[in-house]
Amino acid sequence: MNKKEVIAEFARKNQITKAVAAREADAFLDTIKEALEAGEKVVLPGFGVFEVSERAQREGRNPRTGERITIASSKIIRFRPGKDLKDRVKK
């Protein structure tokens, strides 16, 4: 399911236009993005938790030459599904 399909389903379930649903979805996603950008954890009970994690600097190899390289540390976004979501997917 892509974003367009999600918005259409959201609009249908809430009996609103697709334009309004698209604005609401964009506002919701922007809020999550801003919180993660600020380093905050986003907890959506029943759905899951989004959080920013630091990936440490590490050694790697260039696959073409076999030369050792240093891979810089970076920030990544992690998602842990909530119990309700896990249970629904298992069924």
Image (cartoon, grey):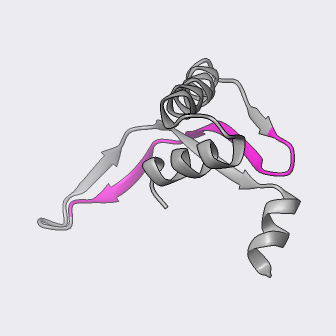
Chief secondary structure of the magenta portion: strand
Give the side of residue 83 with respect to residue 65, left or right: right
- For the C terminus, give its image quadrant: bottom right
Q: Identify the residue at horizontal 34%, vertical 57% (top origin).
A: 60
Give the side of residue 36 with respect to residue 49, left or right: left
In the picture as drawn, the residue positioned furthest to the left comes out as 65
Task: Confirm whether the magenta stretch covers residue 53.
Answer: yes
Q: Position of residue 46 (x, y in %)?
A: 85, 51
- Camera-side residue of 50 and 71: 50
Q: Identify the residue at horizontal 86%, vertical 44% (top origin).
A: 45
Q: Identify the residue at horizontal 33%, vertical 46% (top origin).
A: 70
Give the side of residue 43 with respect to residue 34, left or right: right
Q: Where is residue 59 in the image (x, y as percent from the top left)?
A: 39, 53
Q: Where is residue 73 in the image (x, y as percent from the top left)?
A: 45, 37
Q: What stretch is highlighted in magenta?
A: 44-62
The answer to which quarter of the image holds residue 37 is top right
